[in-house]
Amino acid sequence: MALSGEGFGDKTPVTDQQEVEVEARGEGQTYFTIPGAFVFLGGGDNLLIVHLHLASRLNSHLKQKKIKKLSSRFRSTWLELGDANTNYFHSSITINQCRSKLCTIKNAEGTILTEPEDIVKEVVTYFQTMFIVVDNVDADYVELINTRVDEDYKGMLVAQPTKDEVDKAMLSMKVGKSPGLDGLTAEFYQRNCSLIGNDVFFLYL
């Protein structure tokens, strides 16, 4: 590959080298050694011009060296060009799936369950038992708790909400949130409050 060297002195082919080097060559002259490049030499303050394609080849060369180095040190790391479809990565995926999969479980009686249906039932039962509310409060302890809310404030707390309060709460909901159990967003209720306000009030109250 050669460029016109008119006005830039002689052109010198440079052989492949491992690194980019800058050397002094004669008084007031400098040249760059780039793998497979033709470099144009000039004296004094003349600029040295290197073909852009050659610079791209150099960047690609150094980039490939870096990728190979990373690949040898961290085989499980996602590289810039993507991981190779090798047995190593397939084995990694299989191991992770086995770790995440619940194949057996022991219930409270010590029985080992292996069927998927039994495992699901046992997991549901376990968490239901953990979070269930048991009404076993001793009445003697309740009498020791002092009253913190007066009757007037208590009446306000347990009073049935009015339609105006429901509408105000509906319009104060933040937008851009996930929909509720009915699949409808806050924006839907706010924009259609005048149409469905009464229905919502009687439906939930």
Image (spheres, rainbow, N blue to C red):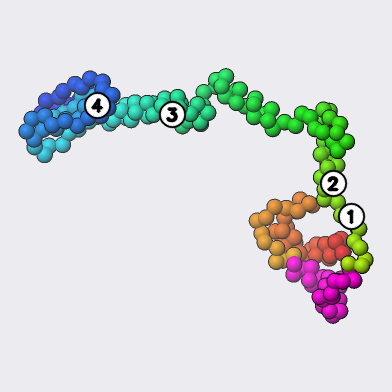
Residue pointed to by mark 4: 34
Tell me where residue 58 sits by quadrant: top left
What is the three-letter code of the residue carrying label 4? Ile
Instruction: Tell me: residue 124, above or below residue 77.
Output: below
Q: Where is residue 48 in the image (x, y as percent from the top left)?
A: 17, 33
Q: Taking the image as drawn, is residue 199 in sight?
A: no
Label 4: which secondary element: loop
Q: Position of residue 152 (x, y in %)?
A: 84, 80
Q: Give the range drawn in magenta.
A: 142-169
Residue ID at (79%, 29%): 104
Question: Which numbered circle lies on residue 134?
Answer: 1
**Which mark is nearer the camera, 3 or 4?**
3
What is the three-letter code of the residue carrying label 2? Gln
Q: Earlier in the sequence, mark 4 or mark 1?
A: 4
Residue pointed to by mark 3: 70
Whether residue 155 appears in magenta in the rendering, the answer is: yes
Instruction: Quote the CA–CA distance across marks 4 and 1.
Output: 79 Å
Label 3: which secondary element: helix
Horizontally, residue 169 falls left or right of residue 32, namely right
Q: Earlier in the sequence, mark 3 or mark 4?
A: 4
Residue ID at (86%, 31%): 111
Label 1: which secondary element: loop
What is the three-letter code of the residue carrying label 1? Val
Residue pointed to by mark 2: 128
**Which mark is nearer the camera, 4 or 1?**
1
Residue ID at (45%, 24%): 72
What is the three-letter code of the residue carrying label 3? Leu
Label 2: which secondary element: helix
